[in-house]
Amino acid sequence: AVFASYLIRFRPLIDEHYLAYFLKSPSYWGSISEKSLGIAIPNVNASKLKQITIPIPPLPEQHHIVAKIEELFTKLDAGVKVLNKVKSQLKRYRQAVLKHAFEGKLTEEWREAHKGEIEPASVLLERIKKERKKKAGWEYKKLLPLDMSDLPELPKGWMWTILGEISESMKNGIYRPRKFYGDTGTACLRMYNIENGSIVWTDIKRMNLTSEEIEEYKLQPGDIIVNRVNSRELVGKAAVIPVGLETCVYESKNIRLRLYGEH
């Protein structure tokens, strides 16, 4: 089965690709390293993930940042063929591109050209709060206050927040013993299916689940899954669920992050 178009979230309030690129950035990986420090088995849980700080620009600027990153990365990919001997330099440059993206440096000219036209991030975050209050069974859960002391200054119209404030939900995946796995059943994405920020549809395992379990753990386009248990270098790796995957769930070593959207 393929996801029908009506399952895609209508008018998302955060660009999932903006968030996915943030989850590859030096800032994010620095936070993951801090939260895994001193742990024998490196891991990140939903509580830790919710407290990670993220710079939020206005939604149109998020789209433009994604386009700019993809434009620069495309040029880098083309350059690999010519500069095969300096792959390590290209990796460092990719990280520099992401660092500049989340400091607002990639879109300085764009902001100047659209001055006065764009809804600021403060208004966007208020809209997300309104959507949160509409949610059935919503209960206010106070998150830890945001410590701004070590955070760099952002461009006008941007705001610092934490992942927990822009996420509709963060949920660990399903765990079942080996006897539930087989050649038929519902596809289940494991940590091995997240590679270089994308879903890799190879060596897919299948699970025999009830319809209620499938409904609770199924992934939909725009969801982001984050690996919560792995080596220190790989814990925290993430990927956006694309349009067109067959119905699938995700295993317990991953967290599903779902963003708010207006309906």
Image (cartoon, rainbow, N blue to C red):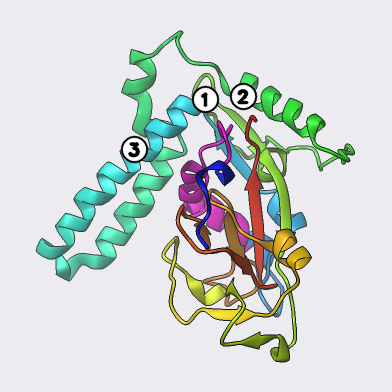
Element type where label 3 sits in the image: helix
**CA separation in Å, label 1 and label 3:** 15 Å
Q: Do the residues labelled 3 and 2 touch (CB within 8 Å)?
A: no
Mark 3 highlights which residue?
A: 67
The percent coordinates of residue 99 (x first, y second) are: 42, 45
Marks 3/2: CA distance?
20 Å
Q: Quadrant of residue 135?
A: top right
Amino acid type assigned to the residue bearing label 2 in the image: Leu
Q: Where on the picture, by quarter, is residue 106?
A: top left
In the image, which residues are magenta?
A: 9-33
Q: Residue furthest top?
A: 116
Q: Which of marks 1 and 2 is nearer the N terminus?
A: 1
* Mark toward the start of the polypeptide (1 vs 3): 1
Amino acid carrying label 1: it is Pro
10 Å crowding of disc 3: few (<14), some (14-19), many (20+):
some
Q: Are marks 1 and 2 in contact (CB under 8 Å)?
A: yes
153 up-or-down from 53: above or below: above
**Residue drawn 52% across and 63% down?**
1
- Residue 174 in magenta? no
Q: Whole-percent x and y of residue 8? A: 55, 43
Circle 2: element type = helix
Q: Residues within 10 Å of mark 2 (few under 14, many from 20)?
A: some
- Relative side of 58 to 124, left or right: left
Q: In the rendered view, would you say 200 is above or below 176?
A: above
Q: Which badge, 3 or 2, comes first in the chain's sequence? A: 3
Check residue 124 in the rendering and tell me which mark sits there, or answer none.
2
**Quarter of the image that includes the C terminus:** top right
Front one among 167 and 157: 167
For image coordinates 38% across by 31% down, the residue present is: 64
Picture disc at residue 58: 1
| Cα distance in 3D space between marks 1 and 2 | 7 Å
Closer to the camera in the image, 51 or 243: 243
